[in-house]
Amino acid sequence: MNIYKEIEAAIQAADHIVITAHKSADGDSVGSSLGLLHFIEKLGKKAVVCHPDKAPDFLHWLDTSSIILMEENPEEVTAQMKKADLIFCLDYNATNRVGPKMQSLLEEATCKKIMIDHHLDPEDFPTLTISETTASSTAQLIVDLIEHSGHLDLLDEKIGTPLYLGILTDTGSFKFSSVKPRTHEVLAKLLAAGVVHHLVHEKLNDTNTEGRLRLQGYAMSEKLEVLHEHHVAIISLSKEELSKYNYQKGDTDSLANLLLSIKGMKAAIVFKEKDGIMKISFRSKGAENPVNVLAKEHFDGGGHANAAGGMSDLTVAGTLEKLRLLIPQYF
């Protein structure tokens, strides 16, 4: 039996399935969760989705009403996790990625756990693991599950739309090096299943608020620092600056890619202050410019070679100075 059929068998045998994903929800974590949920429902089973926190506003055109949030309803998430006899761990490779509250529930759970993920260095806590680091996204791996378990005939618009979204967002609209021939094969299957791709693009991209555009304009005009000799661009934003422009979760997500669009840039770093901690986003181009090593070695983070995250407990100015000193060593 291949692993995909094993996962299908686990779904069919379970009475209470919980789907989890990482903290700081994004298009892939939300899209893969909802796509898997709808697939499980098509198999005639029931499941619930439990996430640590709310998805950014620009994803709310999806029907996320079924997602139970730890940050809003910890009692319900606790109850669901404790009675689960099968837990899916989507788009994360370590238990600490779900936040401390859900981490303890996940680690205490004695039921079967299934990891489906595309990040490097997965922990060995799951019972079954699909860890494909060359895949563009976890959403792509959910399509693999549907196909290789023999249920491609069940794929429809309801299942496919969030999966298309997950692939779209995690590939930077299909421009990252993680896009392979298989990615386009999967996209073709989603379109054939009824996904209206141009509507997904419109709903994802045509959702700017005035505050988001003003914040991005301010960041680009007033906070952009370019280290020309190293081909690296940096933006830093304090909590006061974010507050001035009525920052909402997700408002700064496109800034790193904007910086990479500057001619000659090899890497982009954007960080913002939240609860006294600097949340850092690293992006780069090409295999010769990995950013995950910098994130892991100096900012308690990690991720993909060209897309990583980290954090700093220094001030905005202190974090900026630390980056200025480190960048010459890496670029």
Image: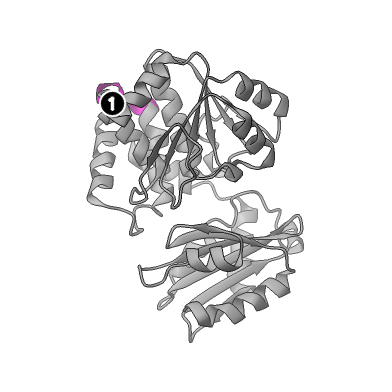
Q: Quadrant of residue 215?
A: bottom right
In this view, 319 is above or below 254: below
Q: How is the image coloured?
A: one colour
Residue lying farthest to the bottom in this orientation: 229
Quadrant housing the N terminus: top left
Q: Percent x, y for residue 151?
A: 27, 23
In this view, 158 is above or below 227: above
Q: Quadrant of residue 38?
A: top left
Q: Percent x, y for residue 48?
A: 54, 22
Q: Which residue carries the number 1 mark?
A: 149
Q: Percent x, y for residue 159?
A: 38, 28
In this view, 116 is above or below 249: above
Q: Percent x, y for residue 219?
A: 62, 68
- Residue at position x 63%, y 30% from top? 108
Residue sitting nearer the eye, 277 or 296: 296
Q: Give the SS element for disc 1.
A: loop
Q: Magenta stretch containing residue 156, yes or no?
A: yes
In this view, 210 is above or below 238: above
User: Can the viewer see residue 28 in this picture?
Assistant: yes
Q: Which residues are magenta?
A: 152-158
